[in-house]
Image: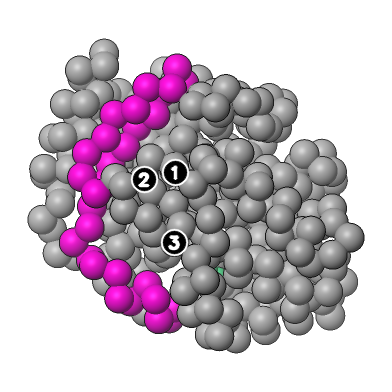
Amino acid sequence: MDSNIMQAILNSVEKYKGIKEGKNASYIPYLAEVDPNLCALTVVTKEGEVFSAGDDEYRFAIESISKVCTLALAMEDLGPEKVRQKIGDSPTGLPFNSVIALELHKDKPLTPLVNAGAMATTSIIKANSKEERWKRILDFQKKMMSDKVELSDEVNKSEQTTNFHNRGIAWLLYSAQQMFSDPMEACEVYTRQCSTLVSSKDLATLAATLANKGKNPITKEQVIKESHISHILAEMTMEGLYEESGDFAYTVGLPAKSGVGGGLLAVVPGVLGIAAFSPPLNKYGNSVKGIKMIKHLAKELNYNIYNK
Ligand code: GLN
């Protein structure tokens, strides 16, 4: 099986690394400048084996994949039912930074995996100060991935000085009593959590931690309660790729999460985690090559969970 995984990774990277579709995110200045030709695909198994090809040491901005870590931490703090009551458990059917979604759904963000719900989730993390909230979120990212995960001052500055749209969403949430800390503080901490640098190996470890019932297979630490995993994976299936989530469930059949930095991860529950990296995005803000590579790998190795 191991040589099959490595061969499938190599086949997938070889087949798609040269395609030219998609564009880097440009609304965050830093992301527009990342080399669009970078490309990586990595698998971490629940036993902690790593299979990888391409630019898998390159560190890029985690962006919205951080929403999964903060959601998992919120569940540790409050339990899944409270998080579900406060934020919601359904897809919005609208873009990740939609303001309309808030109006349509009576000011409930609906899901922790879009910007509105993610900022509200950041605001419910237990802490007595902004810095304590931030430290807890960063530590949790490290636990789900590795100690190498750190804030990039450059990415953070690029985002904090241009995140006007998210600040607007944060105030709308506040006016609808959907923010549980100061709204600008929540927006700032959320923006920091998006600005950490990770490699495809880190993201595959995150995916493998979810695949391994909440135990990081590299560090062997139980990071998330086992009973929370199915809820996190359900959210990822419904909204992990925004309006493309249904298509991904239909054609690939794995819980997944994307970030506008070009990262994409998918979870094969009980088996392994997959992560891809390639900066050019499609119109939904998901990595074009990331989707193609993971789709190819999952098909070749028969990982669709609905085919079991
Ligand atoms: N930091 C980005 C934002 O809030 C993350 C978006 C994403 O990755 N989809 O807009």
In the image, taking residue 249 as reference, residue 146 lies left or right, namely right
Q: Is residue 139 above or below residue 95?
A: above
Rounded to the nearest angstrom, the CA distance separating label 1 from label 3 is 11 Å
Residue 88 place in picture, x, y as percent: 74, 53
For this rendering, which residue is in front, 131 or 75? Answer: 131
Q: How is the image coloured?
A: one colour
Rounded to the nearest angstrom, the CA distance separating label 1 from label 2 is 5 Å
Considering the numbered disc 3 on the image, is that residue within a helix, a strand or a loop? strand
Q: Give the residues in magenta.
A: 27-55
Q: Is residue 136 above or below residue 180?
A: above
Q: Quadrant of residue 124?
A: bottom right
The answer to whether the residue labelled 1 contacts the one labelled 2, judged by CB atoms less than 8 Å apart, is: yes
Q: Quadrant of the C terminus?
A: top left
The answer to whether the residue labelled 3 contacts the one labelled 2, judged by CB atoms less than 8 Å apart, is: no
Q: Is residue 284 visible?
A: no
In the image, taking residue 173 as reference, residue 236 lies left or right, namely left
Report the residue marked by disc 1.
203
- Indicate yes or no: mark 2 CB to ligand 1 under 8 Å: no
Q: Quadrant of the N terminus?
A: top left
User: What amino acid is found at the position of numbered circle 2 in the picture?
Assistant: Ser
Report the residue marked by disc 2.
200
